[in-house]
Each structure stands twice: as structure tokens, then as C-alpha cells.
């Protein structure tokens, strides 16, 4: 099941983000190797500097998604003001087999399966 981890940095914490970036990237590499990471990247503030993160993961359930979010080195370092864990349905431009439409999908968007794992 796909989950979006929507993380907002605490104001003025860019130095903490930069300090923990190597560990965060290594953590994402581990998720990628395990097949759980779909994509990830920072949100940018008006000044063009990172001020949050979006991490899309494919895991079994919400409990696992919350565990992944808590294990992120950025979260462990106290960088985030908020972390929103939300189930997500990839409808447009999804890889084959990734879409799980419940309602509101046309036949051209509908594809079988719950994911690639």
C-alpha cells in the first residue's frame, strides 16, 4: 500500500537538515534497496531552500509507514515540526500494476493490483 510521508521542517532548522543529510540519504538508499521507496525529495521554501520532505513508500500498512517515518534520521534528529502519514492512490502515470482505484477512476486509468511488491 502506498503512503506519502509529508514532513514539514521546524523553522530555522536548515543547519540541522544539512548536518543529517548524509544519514537521511543512506536511509533512503536502504528503503530503495528493499523496494519500499517509490520517490522522495525536499519541499522548497520561497527562498529556494529545503523546508520539508515528501517520501513516497510502498509498505504493508499504516503501522509500517509510521515506523518508517519515525526511523528517518531527520525525524530522529528532531528536524520535523509535523509528519503527516497519508495513504495515497497513484492514478495518473502510475507504473503498471500500481493503481488501485476504489472510486472515481475511469476505465482508462483503472489497472489491477495493489502495487509491485
Image (spheres, rainbow, N blue to C red):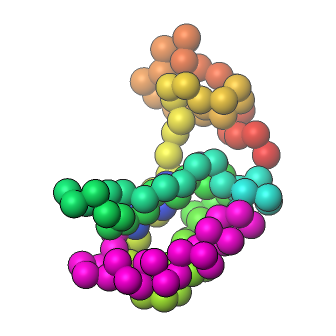
- Estimate the x, y position of residue 84 in percent, counting from the top left: 40, 65
Residue drawn at 43 percent across, 78 percent down? 17
Q: Is residue 26 magenta?
A: yes
Q: Is residue 110 visible?
A: yes
Task: Tally the numbered discs.
Answer: 0
Question: Magenta segment range?
Answer: 8-30
Q: Nearer the viewer, residue 9 or 22?
A: 22
Q: Main secondary structure of the magenta part?
A: helix
Q: Is residue 61 above or below residue 91?
A: below
Q: Is residue 49 left or right of residue 5?
A: left
Q: Is residue 41 above or below residue 90?
A: below
- Estimate the x, y position of residue 37 in percent, counting from the top left: 66, 54
Instruction: Determine which quarter of the picture holds residue 9.
Output: bottom left
Q: Nearer the viewer, residue 24 or 107?
A: 24
Residue drawn at 64 percent across, 60 percent down? 61
- Estimate the x, y position of residue 74 in percent, counting from the top left: 50, 79
Amino acid at each position: 500500500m502506498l503512503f506519502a510521508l509529508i514532513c514539514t521542517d521546524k523553522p530555522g532548522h536548515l543547519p540541522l537538515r544539512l548536518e543529517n543529510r548524509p544519514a537521511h540519504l543512506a536511509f533512503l538508499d536502504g528503503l530503495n534497496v528493499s523496494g519500499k521507496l517509490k520517490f522522495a525529495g525536499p519541499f522548497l521554501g520561497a527562498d529556494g531552500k529545503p523546508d520539508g520532505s515528501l517520501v513516497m513508500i510502498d509498505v504493508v500498512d499504516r503501522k509500517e509507514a509510521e515506523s518508517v517515518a519515525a526511523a528517518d534520521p531527520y525525524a530522529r534528529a528532531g528536524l520535523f515540526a509535523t509528519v503527516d502519514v497519508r495513504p495515497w492512490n497513484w492514478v495518473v502515470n502510475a507504473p503498471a500494476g500500481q493503481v488501485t482505484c476504489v472510486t472515481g477512476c475511469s476505465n482508462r486509468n483503472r489497472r489491477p493490483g495493489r502495487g509491485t511488491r
